[in-house]
Image (cartoon, grey):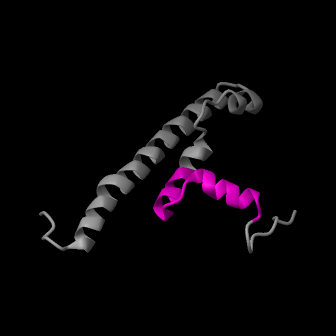
Amino acid sequence: MHAQPGDVAQRALEELVVELLERCLDELVQARARAEKLLVERRSGRPWLDVVTGEHRPLVVERISTVPAALFGVSRQRISALLRDNGPGLEEPRR
């Protein structure tokens, strides 16, 4: 069913489904495949240091962090910058 002229909400929902959710699903599928590959490498006896330092970009964590960033309409880099710069109201975690 196509949106009626002037049905802004329906067009926005269609855009959400087609563009945003598909992109997020693709990122998660790729992250899962990469994580499974890392597990295979580790189970074969490779040390964690070798497994992790040999990982190609984008890293699993980078792929996963892309999903909520996309849902909120910001880039992963922007979120990283905000956290790094301790933006207003953000405190360093206690250890």
Give the residue displayed 55% in from the left and 49% down from the top. Answer: 64
- Front residue of 4/71: it is 4
Q: Is residue 23 left or right of residue 73?
A: left
Q: Is residue 59 left or right of residue 7?
A: right
Give the residue displayed 76% in from the left and 60% down from the top. Answer: 85
Instruction: Using the image, determine if residue 52 lies above or below residue 24.
Output: above
Task: Specify the segment rendered in magenta.
Answer: 65-86
Q: Is residue 18 magenta?
A: no
The image shows residue 65 at horizontal and vertical percentages of: 57, 52
Give the residue displayed 54% in from the left and 45% down from the top. Answer: 63
The image shows residue 23 at horizontal and vertical percentages of: 40, 49
Instruction: Using the image, determine if residue 15 lies above or below residue 37.
Output: below
The image shows residue 25 at horizontal and vertical percentages of: 41, 50
The image shows residue 41 at horizontal and vertical percentages of: 63, 27
Q: Residue furthest front?
A: 6
Q: Is residue 41 left or right of residue 32?
A: right
- Front residue of 58/12: it is 12
Magenta span: predominant SS is helix
Tally the marks.
Answer: 0
- Front residue of 89/21: it is 89
Q: Quadrant of the C terminus?
A: bottom right
Give the residue displayed 57% in from the left and 39% down from the top. Answer: 35
Q: Quadrant of the N terminus?
A: bottom left
Q: Residue furthest right?
A: 95
- Front residue of 50/87: it is 87
Q: Is residue 82 magenta?
A: yes
Q: Is residue 8 left or right of residue 91?
A: left
